[in-house]
Image: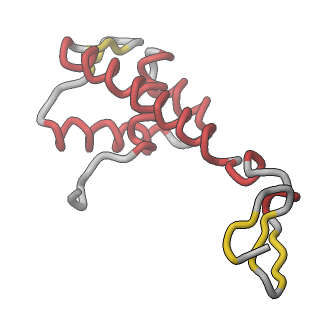
Amino acid sequence: MTEDSMTLTQLEYFCMVCRYHSITRAADALYVSQPTISTSIRDLEKEFHLKLFNHGKNRISLTKDGAAFYQKAEFILKQTQELYTDFSNIEKKAAPAADRYSSYDQHGIFSAGDRPVSGTV
């Protein structure tokens, strides 16, 4: 990845503009400034050599390339959220405490509730 590689934040900003059909309303919803959103979108357009939006008087609309980009961006954000959800609480999904503790004696190592792991009985 290079220094000018897109970020998840840029994709989130882009998708919010698509949902609201407005840079200002997206900025308000995200609690960031309008120039922050505009710069982010301009950077995406520059990086991919695409025009993502047609700008009208009061609203903006997606170009054909923008619509395709939006579809992929939404997919990436959804997959990212699923990844986060699946793995952010991994410790809570770990085995119960009794299964994590082992005891050792002269004859071998035993896992609680299991047969000997090694050694003799």
- Residue 45 percent location from the top left of the image: 21, 35
Residue pictured at 23% horizontal, 57% vertical: 1
**Closer-to-camera residue (61/84):** 84
Q: Which colour scheme is used?
A: secondary structure
The C terminus - image quarter: bottom right
Residue lying furthest front: 121
**Closer-to-camera residue (76/91):** 91
- Residue 7 percent location from the top left of the image: 37, 47
Report the number of numbered marks. Answer: 0
Q: In this view, does 110 lie to the left or right of 62?
A: right
Residue pictured at 85% horizontal, 56% vertical: 113
| Vertical position of residue 48 compared to residue 104: above or below | above
- Residue 50 percent location from the top left of the image: 15, 29
In the figure, residue 39 lies in which quadrant?
A: top left
| Vertical position of residue 111 compared to residue 6: above or below | below
Residue pictured at 75% horizontal, 79% vertical: 108
Residue pictured at 54% horizontal, 24% vertical: 25
Q: Is residue 4 left or right of residue 121?
A: left
Residue lying furthest left: 49
Q: Is residue 100 left or right of residue 84?
A: right
- Residue 92 percent location from the top left of the image: 77, 49
Q: Is residue 33 left or right of residue 6?
A: right
